Amino acid sequence: AVEIAASDLLELGRAPEALAYLDEASEIKAKSGIPPRTSRFNFNTGVRIRLALAQGQVESARSMLGELFVDPKETRGLSFTAMDQALLTADVDLADGHTDAAAEIAAQVRQKIEKSGLQAYFEFYTMRADLIEGEAALQDNRPQAALPLLQSSLKMREKLLDPSSPKIAEAQIALARCHLAMGDLKQAQTLATSATAIHSLHKELGEQYREPLRQLQAQLKSHAGS
């Protein structure tokens, strides 16, 4: 419960409180005899990695990837734990500018899901993979390649998440940047308006959500004035 609260605090941008909750959870596990770098520590570690990324601490996030535990037996088939580890690694690579590595990992996750024939059960992972690979293509100035991936990620988020979810706005912002890179100012503005409406529903929201919207709005203002 404490770890779930920490994840929620991360979404709200309350990093010091989130870290305190994670430390409290770690102490509880230690007192209960649960060793670190085991499956029961993975959620805690995953939140810590996302917290570091939200604060721009990429090297700190990378250093924690090795603390995630995946049972070797799980690698034979589809594993939630292995996919979480892979996508967190891709997130770190993307934040570190290693777009090729991030895209490759994301594509491998999606391909493994597709080959399994169990796509309907792994849509949350597919939508994450699509966004990462799309963002990587966008960073490499390949908006045409990014477009279908970002559209797919947004479509799945709109299907699976509450309409007020900032995760929907996250995908809308990425897709707006893609349209802007392709010269479609009108579509970019429409998506930006939708993302802004979602953000307005949240009194508290982390900078990992707010800053990309501010950057997009600045880009739109620049293009509109040119």
Image: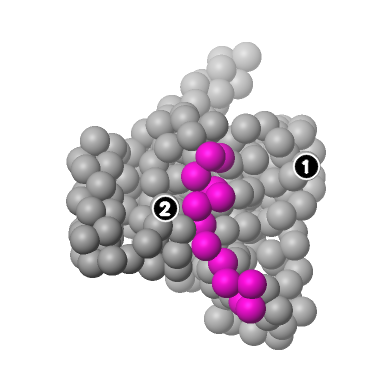
> Of the residues under marks 1 and 2, which one precedes in the sequence?
2
Is 61 situated above or below 75? above
Q: Give the image quarter of residue 15.
A: top left
- Name the residue rendered at 60%, 21% in the picture: 223
Query: Which one is in front in this view, the residue at disc 1 or the one at disc 2?
Result: 2
- Name the mark on residue 45: 2
Dot 2, crowdedness within 10 Å: few (<14), some or many (≥20)? many
**Quadrant of image for the N terminus:** bottom left
What is the span of residues highlighted in magenta in the rendered image? 62-74
Query: Residue 2: x and y, percent?
Result: 21, 59
Q: Give SS at disc 1.
A: helix
**Quadrant of image for the C terminus:** top right
- Name the mark on residue 100: 1
- Name the residue rendered at 56%, 17% in the picture: 222
Is 115 situated above or below 32? below
Quick check: is 67 in the magenta stretch?
A: yes
Residue 155 shown left or right of residue 38 in the figure: right
Quick check: is 106 in the magenta stretch?
A: no
